[in-house]
Amino acid sequence: MTTFTTVPLFGGALTADLPPDFADVSTIRQVPDNQEVYLHTTGLTSIIFDITERIIQPNDSSDEAALCFHFADIVTSSADETRIWADFAPAALAKCRMSIPAFTMFATQHPSAAPSRSPQADFTGIFLVLMLLAAQKTDIVISINVPHMADEYAREDVDLEARKPGPLLGAAIQMRDRILETFEVKHWDLIVNEEEEA
């Protein structure tokens, strides 16, 4: 069974439980101030917490449009093909004292037919969580990215059509659910849109 430990994020403004075998990437390379990035110490799975300006699409201010925008922002830098398996599901944040709307989705990216000199993942699973902080004009986007390299998993263990996620995606589902159960905002004054500070 996976163990978890409470991790302070953004100087302690936020907290969430993560597995202890995920390391803070900022200790080895520069990470943008609006992001916290954690990488599995022996694998390829990563968890990214991203604080962004509230997204409102022209002519569509729906929460679903915001989620789709953030997802597109994550995947458009790649030529890989994308398939959405679980689209725009409401989620509950169990420990938040204030009501924060939250939504999840799950998708996979598959390599394009273009040849590559470096090894490519067979596919990458992407679990996305969007939290909407309307008063702060802020979105918090959490993405769990799970590359599946040919020598890192058994193909027979994964059949998404049959709802068979395999060990790597199964572990990511546990992480996503634990984050939803434990996520807290400790210091609201540190989550302020830059326009409000000006």
Image (cartoon, grey):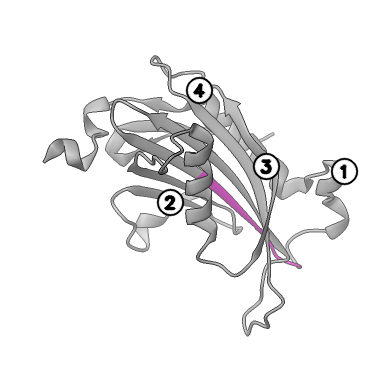
Task: Give the residue at mark 4.
Answer: 93
Mark closest to the chain's N terminus, 3 or 2: 2
Please tell me which residue lies in front, 45 or 94: 94
**Circle on res. 171:** 3
- Which quadrant would the C terminus be assigned to in this image? top left
Decide: marks 1, 4 in contact (CB < 8 A)? Answer: no
Relative height, residue 68 to residue 7 (above, below): below
| Rendering coords of residue 46 (x, y %) | 53, 53
| Amino acid type for the residue under numbered disc 4 | Leu
Q: Residue at x 70, y 65 (%)?
A: 149
- Residue stretch rendered in magenta on the structure: 143-150
Task: Give the residue at mark 2.
Answer: 37
Please tell me which residue lies in front, 147 or 41: 147
Q: Assign the magenta stretch its main secondary structure.
A: strand
Q: Quadrant of residue 15?
A: top left
**Circle on res. 151:** none
- Which quadrant would the N terminus be assigned to in this image? top right
Mark closest to the chain's N terminus, 4 or 3: 4
**Residue 149 magenta:** yes
Q: Residue at x 84, y 47 (%)?
A: 161
Judged from the image, the secondary structure of the residue bearing numbered disc 1 is helix
| Rendering coords of residue 100 (x, y %) | 43, 23
Instruction: State the CA–CA distance, disc 1 to disc 4.
Output: 28 Å
Task: Give the residue at mark 1.
Answer: 162
Instruction: State the CA–CA distance, disc 1 to disc 2.
Output: 31 Å
Mark closest to the chain's N terminus, 2 or 4: 2
Mark closest to the chain's N terminus, 3 or 1: 1
- Can see residue 6? no
| Amino acid type for the residue under numbered disc 3 | Ala
Q: For this view, does 141 lie left or right of residue 192?
A: right
Instruction: State the CA–CA distance, disc 3 to disc 1.
Output: 18 Å
